[in-house]
Structure formats: structure tokens, C-alpha cells
Image: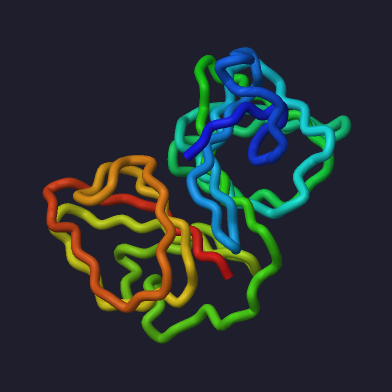
Amino acid sequence: MRSTTLTLVLGLLSSTSSWAQNPSAPATITEKLDTPQARVIVATLQPKTPAVAKNGHATHRVLIYLDDGVMTRKEGEQTRRIEFKRGDVRWRPASGAYIAENISNRPIRILEVDLKGPPSGKPHTTKLDPPLVDPQHYKVELENEHVRVLRIHYGPNEKGARHEHILNRVVVYMNDHPNAKADDVRLAGAATHEEANTTAQHAYRIAVELK
């Protein structure tokens, strides 16, 4: 992975200098994944440092907040205050110019799934759809024509029903798992399987399915 400093925030992709050379920059970007469908980054926003996005953001994206925090987003004459908790999910469509500022007292991290194009048009339903056959563990957090976001939670020593994934998905681990650490990001593809949490701890993750 590589980390670059951006003068823009939340996924604007043109960098100016390294973080070490310019520690007062409003955000740093750490790339996690780059696939034909999406680029996944973590934006770390410094406190009380406005980030001016003069050209806006040309693509749609899913935001997953990795820290508690508060920020503002100004578009034109309108300013919105955005409060969030770790694990909150938001859909952010392509937009024009804006100014974003972390008004918390500490850095905040936002994972961004930046979509590269329109939906593929491929089928995305199955009789073994996880939220249908295993609603105890799979819940739909957000869905539109571009993505479906699933919130996945297994209690200690719980086993789930057999289910099928037919879309590529970006998986974000929200706590430590036997084979993953909190904040790990992985790409998963089509699969039919059963899942089980064999530990005495809760297992929590978020999956962004790419339509």
C-alpha cells in the first residue's frame, strides 16, 4: 500500500506532496484496493484543517466511518454538520465543489469505496441471498442501483445458514477475527458456503457488494 498527501479530501485522486513534507495538509490517503470496479482508500482527516475540493468529486462512493467524529461539508452557501460513529455507512453521489472540515479534536479515518463506472447489469439476486436465508447474521444497511451494503454480525460460537454470494464485494473487518484484524479490507468474489464464528468473541464486518 502507498500513502500520499492530498490537498483535497475523501477520495480526490491528485496528490501534491508527501505527508512527511507537508504535515499541515488536511488529509492523507492510504490505498487499500484497486479493482476494475472500485478503488478503495482510507482518508485520514486532520482536525480543524479545511480541505477545499474545487473540482468536486466525479464518481459515486460509499463511505464507512472508522472513527467517531464530527465534520462539516459546505457546498455553495449551505453548510451541513455530519456526526458519525465507527461503523456508520453513507452513500455519497458524485458532486460539485465543496469544502470539508474535521471539526473533531483528533484525526478521523473514513474508508471510501470509489466506484469506477455504472452498474454491470448482471443479475444480483439468488434464492440463497444471505439476508433472505440468514437474516440473523446478514442485514441490509443500504441499497441502490450501484451497491448493496451488508452489515454482518456473528455472536460467539454462532453458525450461519448456507448462502450464496454472486457479486464481488469489498469486506471491511470492524473487529479482530481469527484470520483478519480490525480495519483490514479484502476483496471477495462469488461463493456458496456456510460461515461460523468459532471464537468466544463477537465477529463484526461490513460488505459492500458491487453491482
In the rendered view of the protein, which quadrant contains the C terminus? bottom right
Q: Quadrant of residue 128?
A: bottom left
Q: Is residue 86 left or right of residue 211?
A: left
Q: Residue at x 31, y 55 (%)?
A: 153
Q: Residue 34: x, y in percent?
A: 55, 53
Q: Quadrant of residue 99?
A: top right
Q: Residue at x 55, y 43 (%)?
A: 41
**Which of the two residues, 159 or 181, is positioned nearer the viewer here?**
181
Q: Is residue 134 left or right of residue 190?
A: left
Q: Residue 36: x, y in percent?
A: 59, 63
Q: Residue at x 71, y 21 (%)?
A: 50
- Taking 201 as reference, is 131 above or below it? below
Q: Quadrant of residue 73?
A: top right
- Taking 130 as reference, is 98 above or below it? above
Q: Residue at x 35, y 69 (%)?
A: 135
Colouring of the image: rainbow
